[in-house]
Amino acid sequence: MNEPLLKLILGFFAVLGSGFAGWLFKRGTTKAEIAKKNAEIEKMQAEVKMTRTESNQAIMDQYQEALDDLKNRYDERYKYLAEEFSRRHEDLKADYERKYIALKEEKDAEIQQLVKKVKNLSSSLEYWKKKYKELEK
């Protein structure tokens, strides 16, 4: 029963002893060593800051490159759409002209038929007028 208690007490003193030894070791460092460590820390912080700056610059460069690429893609797409619009406009214009000519020819043919029909009816009317006048006499 004393053994676990003894182990616990010895462990406690070991922790206290190591803490005290660390404190003594730290206390034993000179101001020059502290200044050197502080200089190293500042140097590391400057390196980290430089790395962050370079990283931010790289990100900005990538963003600018993406924007430039987007502008090029937009210009290419605009040019393609303008050409497509022109082509379709020409196709529609040609289609309209074809339909207009076909419709005009169809209506001209109908007009010719109606003119013939009117001439035919006019001649029939003249015939019947003469016939009617002959009958009246």
Image (cartoon, helix red, strand yellow):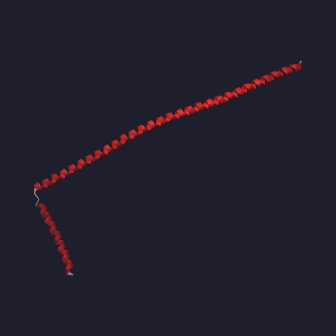
Image vertical order of residue 10 relative to residue 51, above or below: below
Q: Residue 84 placed where, x, y %?
A: 49, 36
Q: Which residue lies furthest to the bottom in this view?
A: 1
Q: Picture coordinates of residue 4 (x, y %)?
A: 21, 78
The image quadrant that residue 119 belongs to is top right
Relative to 75, 10 lies left or right: left
Seen at 29% across and 46% down, the residue is 56
Front-lying residue, 74 or 26: 74
Number of disc labels: 0
Residue at x-position 19% and y-position 73% = 11
Placement of 121 over or under 7, stated as above or below? above
With 85 as the anchor, is 61 left or right in this view?
left
Q: Quadrant of the N terminus?
A: bottom left
Residue 69 place in picture, x, y as percent: 37, 41
Q: For this rendering, which residue is in front, 5 or 130?
A: 130
* Left or right placement of residue 32 versus residue 55 in this view: left
Locate the C terminus by quadrant.
top right
Residue, x 16% and y 71% (percent of image)?
14
Q: Nearer the viewer, residue 83 or 48?
A: 83
Using residue 82 as the reference point, say whether residue 67 is left or right of it: left
Question: As rendered, which of 40 and 132 lies closer to the eye?
Answer: 132
**In x, y percent, where is residue 136?**
88, 19
Residue at the spot 42% in from the left edge and 38% down from the top edge: 76
Kindly give the residue lying farthest to the top in the view shown: 137
